[in-house]
Image (spheres, helix red, strand yellow):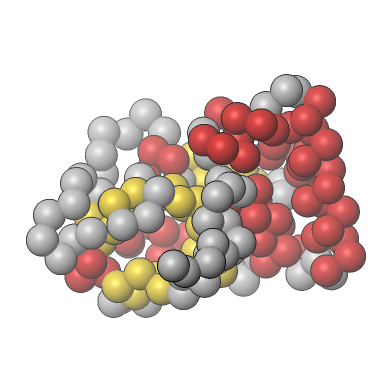
Amino acid sequence: MLPFQQGGLDSLCGIYSLVNAERIINKTSEDDSQELFNSIITFLDKEKLLASILTEGMLLTHIRAILAEVIGDRIPNQRVHFAGVRNPGLNKFWHESSSFLADNSKRTILLGISGVHDHWTVIERISERQIQLMDSDELCRLNRCNCTTVRVRGNRRHVLHPAQTYFLGDA
């Protein structure tokens, strides 16, 4: 029998992803990141959302509320780039995400994925073949050949969700 690891019984990846995204953008210290984490937990508790998020995970509406109410101006540009767009397909998603990150080092992308993982993570860089992550669950990279924006099929076991993807950073 193997022991549970941190995150094995909780669904805090959304909170960690928001803290990691803010850290990438603002080069935040560990102490300031801890303070932001505490503020997010306090907000979720006050809103009576903490218990359900701990056990069931975070929805896009929760992400939106935390960005608006807790993070605010710490991240001036917060947008769901593909909102209202019918599934853009992997090539369009990859190209537009790569272009957004290439323009400025004070940007990152908050990404919702499913398939092998039901997870929120943060994209640091994108090459032609791979997404590099700053992830709370030790997920380091996603190879393009294993990604899709539709459904798991064959080797395409990582489903990227453009409609749940926040482009974050400065203007």
The furthest residue to the top: 48
Name the foreground residue: 77 vs 2.
2
Question: Does residue 120 lie above or below 65 as drawn?
Answer: below
All told, the count of numbered labels is: 0
Residue at 36% from the left image edge and 45% from the top image edge: 162
Observer able to see residue 123? yes
The part of the image, by quadrant, that contains residue 7 is bottom right
Asked where in the image residue 51 lies, by quadrant, the reply is top right
Residue at image point 58% right, 47% down:
10
- Out of 135 and 71, give the one closest to the viewer: 135
Does 35 sit above or below residue 87?
below
Q: For the point 65% across and 55% down, which residue is it? A: 16
**Residue 94: quadrant of the picture:** bottom left
Give the percent coordinates (x, y) of residue 115. 29, 52
Could you tell me if residue 170 is visible in this image?
no
Residue 21, position as x, y percentages in the image: 64, 58
Q: Determine whether, in the image, residue 61 is placed left or right of residue 45.
A: left
User: On the rendered structure, is 66 left or right of 97?
Assistant: right
169 lies left or right of 37? left
Where in the figure is residue 85, as x and y percent of width and height?
A: 32, 34
Q: Residue sitting at 68 percent across and 39 percent down?
A: 67
Percent from the top left, x then y, of residue 129? 29, 76
Classify 132 as above or below 91: below
